[in-house]
């Protein structure tokens, strides 16, 4: 159970909590003059909330550790990421309702482009479209090997998930994605002695599947990451006595929410406006809303600082929809930093804004950015403390001790 010391302190009331996560929000400026995406963006709503509320910055895992999206979100939900380890495959499978039972192995896949020497020239196959990727992924689903059942399903665009079912399978396998171009995909190897059978079967499937894509013009290869099984996570509702809902466009974030027992809501429309309108529609049905914005991370990985700032501006323009609902606690943060300068996730602290008009303690900062958050009243703290702060400011925690 996440943070069992909270259990005797929990107190139900009618308060509403919103955790708004802009994926990969944090950025870096390498000179005093350079601007991050948050500093470049025009954010009058967030700046007002910063003036009225409190700022800080979080460490998703530990200092200097670059987090994946799964552990970074678990940390925000209050699950110690070094204790509750979960692979990307299980998250992706849960996000598209592909069952993963104990003993199954799931992995997240990317279609990629291989050159004539079998080396990776594009890790995402030119970000091939949903429509163009679908028949390629169907070819993968047709590949079967003796002794196991294999299911492959499209997740979104060039992303897919594979689930292998059989006897005696263990998911302790290395990724085949080397995270760079100009080299071939890595060979699957067992990371523990008990996973040798799974490694041999996965190598056999990969060999056949690679041949099946050999004639494809762009997506003629694939990379696998995050081999995992069902993690058996404790229930979010049991941990916090909150009826929680997830509002997200991308399946992986729906997956992590499902694995902790949140209800995943159907969107009424796309983008920040559609997600916030979904919260409005379901406002009376839940008391905790996790709302996820993906494109900040995508543009960070593309190195597109201007587009990342544009997504932040889009969220800011839509914020009045949420504010009109009068949440008791609104937290705006990221799961990790994805600096456009680095084109990848990074270890840098993540901006954090807490707005709870009845309970917050204001600081001296007047706008929302990395540099302002570094000086904010909340200081620098572990992301796993997010839920404790949310519950306390929603007056859902009683006093500890006499």
Image (spheres, grey):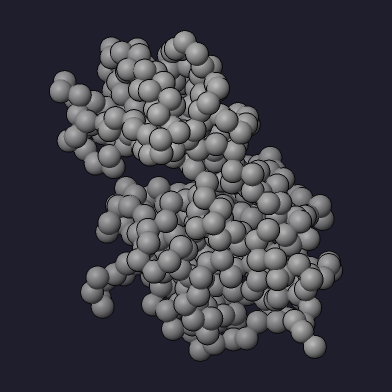
Q: In screen coordinates, is 159 left or right of 116? A: right
User: Vertical placement of 13 versus 212: above or below?
Assistant: below
User: Vertical placement of 394 versus 362: above or below?
Assistant: above
Residue at the spot x=54%, y=56% of the render? 83
* Image quadrant occupied by the N terminus: bottom right
Farthest residue to the left: give it: 117
Residue 32 vs residue 117, the one in the foreground: 117
Residue at the spot x=56%, y=80% of the render? 54
Task: List x then y, in percent, for residue 360.
Answer: 65, 82
Task: List x then y, in percent, for residue 201.
Answer: 41, 21
Task: List x then y, in percent, for residue 265.
Answer: 70, 43
User: Vertical placement of 260 versus 241: above or below?
Assistant: above
Q: In screen coordinates, is 41 left or right of 29? A: right
Residue at the spot x=62%, y=31% of the render? 101
* Image quadrant occupied by the C terminus: bottom right
Instruction: Using the rendered view, name the quadrant where residue 317 is placed.
Output: bottom right
Farthest residue to the front: give it: 193
Residue 332 vs residue 263, the one in the foreground: 263
């Amino acid at each position: 159970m996440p943070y069992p010391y909270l259990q005797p302190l929990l107190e139900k009331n009618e308060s509403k909590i919103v955790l708004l996560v802009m994926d990969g929000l944090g950025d870096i400026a390498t000179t005093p003059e350079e601007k991050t995406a948050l500093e470049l963006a025009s954010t009058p709503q967030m700046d007002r909330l910063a003036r009225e509320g409190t700022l800080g910055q979080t460490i998703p895992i530990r200092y200097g550790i670059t987090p994946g999206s799964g552990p970074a979100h678990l940390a925000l939900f209050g699950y110690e990421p070094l204790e509750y380890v979960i692979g990307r495959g299980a998250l992706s499978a849960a996000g598209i309702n592909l069952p993963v039972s104990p003993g199954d192995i799931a992995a997240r896949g990317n279609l990629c482009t291989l050159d004539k020497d079998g080396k990776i020239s594009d890790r995402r196959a030119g970000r091939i479209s949903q429509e163009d990727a679908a028949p390629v992924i169907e070819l993968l689903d047709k590949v079967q090997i003796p002794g196991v059942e294999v299911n492959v399903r499209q997740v979104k665009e060039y992303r897919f998930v594979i689930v292998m079912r059989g006897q005696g399978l263990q998911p302790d396998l290395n990724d085949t994605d080397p995270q760079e171009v100009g080299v071939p995909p890595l060979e699957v190897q067992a990371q523990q002695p008990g996973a040798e059978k799974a490694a041999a079967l996965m190598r056999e499937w990969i060999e056949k599947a690679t041949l099946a894509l050999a004639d494809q013009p762009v997506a003629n290869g694939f990379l696998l990451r995050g081999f995992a099984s069902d993690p058996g996570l404790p229930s979010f509702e049991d941990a916090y006595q909150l009826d929680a809902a997830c509002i997200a466009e991308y399946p992986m974030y729906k997956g992590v929410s499902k694995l902790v027992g949140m209800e995943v809501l159907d969107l009424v429309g796309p983008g920040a406006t559609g997600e916030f309108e979904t919260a409005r529609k379901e406002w009376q049905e839940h008391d905790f809303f996790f709302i996820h914005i993906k494109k900040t991370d995508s543009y960070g990985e593309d190195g597109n600082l201007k587009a990342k700032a544009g997504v932040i501006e889009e969220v800011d323009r839509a914020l009045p929809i949420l504010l009109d609902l009068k949440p008791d606690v609104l937290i705006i943060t990221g799961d990790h930093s994805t600096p456009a300068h680095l084109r990848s996730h990074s270890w840098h602290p993540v901006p954090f804004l807490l707005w709870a008009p009845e309970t917050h303690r204001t600081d001296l900062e007047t706008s929302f950015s990395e540099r302002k958050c570094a000086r904010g009243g909340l200081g620098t703290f572990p992301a796993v403390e997010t839920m404790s702060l949310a519950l306390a400011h929603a007056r859902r925690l009683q006093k500890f001790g006499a």
